[in-house]
Amino acid sequence: MPVEIAPSFLTADLTRLGEQIDKVLQAGAERIHVDVMDGRFVPNMTFGPLIVRAIKPIVEKSGALLEAHLMIEEPESLIPEFSAAGADLITVHVETCPHLNRTIQQIKDLGLKAGVTLNPSTPLKSLEEIIGGVDLVLVMTVNPGFGGQTYLPSSTSKISKLHRMLVENGLEYIDLEVDGGINVSTVAEVVSAGANVLVAGSSIFNSESSPAKNLTDLRAAAGGVSG
C-alpha cells in the first residue's frame, strides 16, 4: 500500500492554524490528524468538534481525509458530534470501549470510516474479535498525551506482528497507522515494519523549517521503503 502522511497539529502555531494546515495539504498530505484529549484518559486536554468543524472546509477542498483520534473516556457520547462536525474517520481506543463492536458499528452507522487504537502496553490479542470490522488500526508508538516524545523502539516488533496478522487474515486493505516519535530518523523503520499511514506532529510543525518542507523531507525519508 502507498505510504500516506497525516500531519497532527498538536504542536502547531494555533494562531496560524488554517494557514499551516493549508500549507501541508498543498505539500501533499493525504490526511489531517486531530488529536482529541479529555484530561482523563490521557493527561492533557486539546481539541473538540469545533476545531474539526473549523478546518473541515480547508481539508475538504484538498480532497484529504480528516481523521479524529479520540483519546477520551466514553467516546460513544461524542462520536455523533465529531461526525456532524465533518470527520471522515473516527478512531477510538480499545482501552476505553468495553463494548468495542458496538462503538465501531456506531461510527459506521454514521457513514464514517472506523479505526481502533492500541496504547504501547496493550497487546495485539485485544484486536482478534474486531479487526475484520475496522478500516484502520493505529499503533501508538509513544504513550499518548503529549507531542514531541521519543519513539519507543519496542513498537517496531508490534507493528511487524500486526502487519503479519493482517496479511495472514487477508486484511491487507486495512490501514496500519503509527503515531508518536515519527520523524526522518524513524520513518524508514516503521514503514519497513509494515506501517502505511504516518502521523507526524512536532517533526512537521515544531521546527525552524516550514511545515511543507518538513513534510517533503519526511516523505523522502520514507520513499523507496517497502513493508
Image (tube, rainbow, N blue to C red):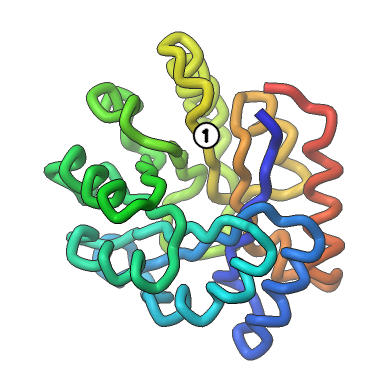
Residue designated by label 1 = 176
Residue at 59% over, 61% down:
32
Where residue 8 appears, x then y in whole percent? 58, 63
Residue at 53% over, 40% down:
177
Where residue 217 appears, x then y in whole percent? 85, 52
Q: Pick whichever, 121 or 130, lies toward us.
A: 130
Decide: is 165 above or below 72. above
* Left or right of 224, for residue 136: left
Neighbour tally class for label 1: few under 14, some 14-19, many 20 plus, Cα within 10 Å: many
Q: Residue furthest top?
A: 168
Residue at 39% over, 73% down:
85
Amino acid type at circle 1 is Leu
Q: Quadrant of the N terminus?
A: top right
Q: Pick whichever, 39 or 71, lies toward us.
A: 71
Q: Quadrant of the C terminus?
A: top right
Q: Which residue lies furthest to the left in this view?
A: 99
Where residue 120 appears, x then y in whole percent? 41, 40
Residue 81, picture quadrant:
bottom left
Q: Pick whichever, 140 or 91, lies toward us.
A: 91
- Element type at marker 1? strand
Q: Pick whichever, 106 or 17, lies toward us.
A: 106
Decide: is 168 above or below 224. above
